[in-house]
Amino acid sequence: MAPSIYVPAPATFRKPIAEAEMMLRRNEELERELRESKRREEKAADELKRVRERLREVEEAEERLCFELGELEAESLCQARDYRRRIADLAEQLARVQVR
């Protein structure tokens, strides 16, 4: 008897091909989701960078305001002392005028 070659039916190849096509589509879908995820991550990183910069600006502004507030408090204290001193001088002058 002569050797024979077995040739499978075409239906035998359809299932692996369909599975491979399905895997390729799934791979494309996953790659698309990965690109979208990376884009969202970059957007979030950019937003975080802007927020950090804004925070730094706000902190600097707060420091400037605190410094200015301290300067105003010191100035108001000097003015209050000068005012009290002026009142005391006027009261003393008034007392001297009333004594005469």
Image: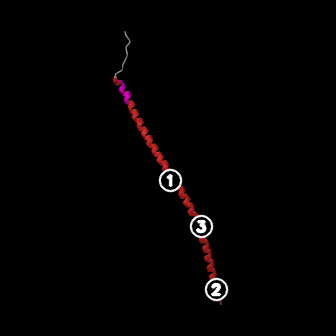
In space, the residues marked 3 and 2 are separated at their CA atoms by 36 Å
Residue under label 2, please give it.
95
Pick whichever of labels 3 and 2 is earlier in the sequence: 3
Side of 100 relative to 37 (left or right): right
Side of 82 relative to 33 (left or right): right
Side of 55 relative to 95 (left or right): left
Principal SS element in the magenta part?
Answer: helix
| Circle 2: residue type | Ala
In space, the residues marked 1 and 2 are separated at their CA atoms by 64 Å
Tell me if residue 97 comes above or below residue 13 in the rendering. below
Question: Which labelled disc corresponds to residue 67?
Answer: none
Q: Residue furthest bottom?
A: 100
The secondary element bearing badge 2 is classed as helix
Q: Nearer the viewer, residue 15 or 25?
A: 25
Mark 3 Cα-neighbour bin, 10 Å: few <14, some 14–19, many ≥20: few
Residue under label 1, please give it.
51
Q: Contact (CB < 8 A) between labels 1 and 3?
A: no
Residue under label 3, please give it.
71
The secondary element bearing badge 3 is classed as helix
| Circle 3: residue type | Glu
Tell me if residue 90 comes above or below residue 19 in the rendering. below
Range shown magenta: 12-18
